[in-house]
Amino acid sequence: MDMREAVKKAIHYGAIQGILQYYICPEECEAHCCKNGQIHIFEEEYRNFSQIDPEKAKKIQSEMPASPLYRIETPCSFLKAHDRCGVYYQRPIVCGLYPFKVNTSGNSIGLQPCPVGFLIIREFASWMIANVSKTGMAEEEKAKVIAEWENTIESYAEELSGFHMKNTLKEIQIPFDELEMFAMYMASKDLPKINAGVDLG
C-alpha cells in the first residue's frame, strides 16, 4: 500500500466521500479554500500535476526535508477563471477532503464551516440531537446535551457569517466512529447524489 492509500485509510476517506457526495459547493463560495487555504500534496500528486501542466506545476514548492510534502501556492494555479477546479478528477487528497481537515489526534477529523461545511455540521448536529432524544438517559441530562448541540449550530452559523474574511476558522471535531455512522445515516436517507463522479476510494 502506497502512502496515499495508507493516508486515505487512516483518515476514513471513503466515509468522508460518502458524505460529500450529497453536497456541492454553492456559487457564493468563490473557491475560498483554493484561493486562501493550505494545499499540501504528496510527491505522487506533484508528479501527476507536472505531467498534466508543467508550467502550472512550477508554482508547487517542495517542503522537504522538513516534510515529505509539496505545497501549491494559492491561489491554486489549476483553478479555472469561473472558480472551479481544472483538475477535479485528479485533485489531491487534501482537496478531496475539504471542508474536512486532518488533525493530529489520530481519532477524529476536523470539519470547517465554509458554506458547504456548515450544511454538513448542521445535519450532523441534527442527527446527534435525534440520537440523544432516543436514548434512555435522564431527561435533564438529555436536555443539556441537546441544548449543547443547538448552541453548536448557532456558534458555527456565526463562524460561517464571517467565513470569507477569516484566515483561520474554528473546526468541529468528529470522532471517526461517529463519522462512519453519520455516513451510513446519510446513505440511509436515499438522497440524490448531487456531487457526481466522486471518488469513493
Image (cartoon, helix red, strand yellow):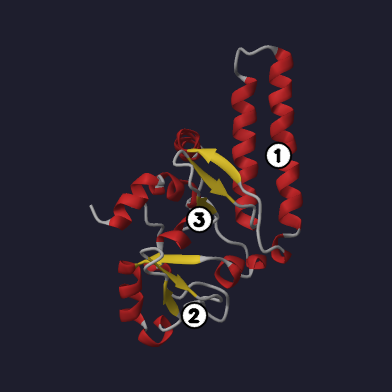
- In primary-sequence order, the first of circles 2 and 1 is 2
How busy is the neighbourhood of tag 1: few (under 14 within 10 Å), some, or many (20 plus)?
Answer: some
Horizontal side, residue 98 vs residue 93: left or right: right
| Dot 2 amino acid type | Ser
Residue 131 position (above or below residue 48): above
Residue 75 percent across, percent down from the top left: 56, 76
Residue 80 in percent (x, y) is at: 52, 79
- The residue labelled by disc 3 is 194
Of badges 3 and 2, the one in the foreground is: 2
Q: Disc 3 or 2, which lies upstream in sequence?
A: 2
When the figure is inspected, residue 116 is found, relative to residue 45, above or below; the finding is: above
Closer to the camera in the image, 38 or 86: 38
Which SS class for mark 1? Answer: helix
* Crowd rating for badge 2 (residues with CA inside 10 Å; few <14, some 14–19, many 20+): some
Q: Residue at x 58, y 61 (%)?
A: 25
Q: Is residue 2 left or right of residue 68?
A: left
Cα–Cα gap, marks 3 and 1: 26 Å
Residue that badge 1 annotates: 152
> Disc 2 marks which residue?
77
Q: How many marks?
A: 3
Say whether disc 3 or disc 1 marks the residue closer to the N-terminus.
Answer: 1
Find numbered disc 2 in the image and state the secondary structure of the residue it sits on: loop
Q: Position of residue 174 (x, y in %)?
A: 54, 39
